[in-house]
Amino acid sequence: MLEAYRGYATPDTLVLRGRVLSHIRRGEAREGQSRWRNFRQMLLLFFTAEVEGVEVSAGEVSGLSDEEGYIRLEVARPSATTGWTRVNGYIAGDAATFPVHIPEPDARRGVISDIDDTMIHTGAHRLILNLWTTFTGSPLTREVFADSIALMEHLAEDGRNPVFYVSSSPWNLHHFLETLFDREGLPKGPFFLRDLGITEDKFITAGHGQHKGEAIDTILAANPNLPFVLLGDTGQKDAHVYLDAARRHPGRIAGIYLREPGSGPDAATKSALEEIAALGVDCASAPDFDAITARLKGA
């Protein structure tokens, strides 16, 4: 089976991403179901059976799934299409539609947002709480912060500006997050999640900071003419990751805004925020995004 992920556009191509699996185990969440049922449904998402070496084609392009089942194809970008478009992909015995976002020609900025404790309440800064929240919730029970929705709606300008979500959560949660975000009305955007698989040359893929940094680099390269706003939180070193990104891409980062979960920023995070501001990047952190949204609307 071909599981299609949300893709994105470069100036010349559409980037299609997905995964080839022998089957997909996915239960449908229902109102009022128990935490135990939530746990079993979440656990099923991690018992995937990836298939290597399967040819996937789209248009005139084809490629083979890697040892973790992932596939990435680039097809020619249509000249007069913007917004969300769909590209058909095929493997032997199955087909899937890749949703791909093409930025509007009048886009003013791009938005890159973290997910855990930025868009949704997770407790990612505390491992046990993070695992409990992740595995005992469902798309019907997980909490998306209302202030995050308001900030994202303001930054996205009713779909005018492209939105991207970057997280260290595994690709197994793509459908879960897609369902949750759509239900809560967050602006649609491609996800850049993390491969937690074990391969021949590495025990596990890039760490939290490296994964986020590489995703930011990829997104900025795909949108060379747009400045970007970065959203995150102070609980998972986002300030340090975003500081490094601002240094690597001078003039491309228009703002960095962080939620303060738990006890708030530590001394190292405060120092990173000061360095971000010294680079001339608009920067702020707060327990929630309400004040930041109000300030941006008044700017």
Image (tube, helix red, strand yellow):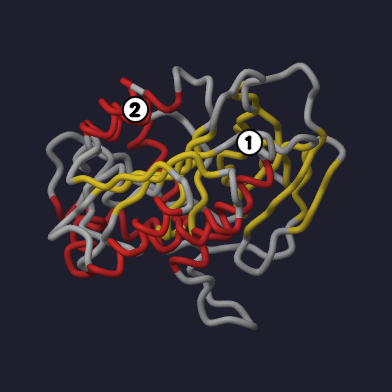
Q: Residue at x 40, y 41 (%)?
A: 282
Q: Which residue is mark 2?
A: 296
Q: What residue is drawn where x is 87% and y is 38%?
A: 60
Quick check: 120 above or below 294?
below
Instruction: Give the amino acid at mark 1.
Output: Phe
On residue 241, which mark appears? none
Q: Position of residue 12 (x, y in %)?
A: 80, 35
Q: Quadrant of residue 223?
A: top right
Rendered-image quadrant of the C terminus: top left
Which of 164/194 is in front? 164
Q: CA distance from mark 1 to mark 2?
A: 34 Å
What's the residue at 77%, 16% (across, down)? 80
Q: In this rendered view, identify the residue nearer to me: 30 or 6.
A: 6
Q: Which residue was labeled with disc 1?
A: 98
Numbered disc 2: secondary structure:
helix
Q: Residue at x 63, y 38 (%)?
A: 8
Indicate the quadrant where residue 158 lies. top left
Q: Amino acid at mark 2?
A: Leu
- Is 185 left, or right, of 230 in this rendering? left
Instruction: Name the N-terminal-most of marks 1 and 2.
Output: 1
| Residue density around tag 2, few if under 14, some if 14–19, many if 20 or more, within 10 Å | few
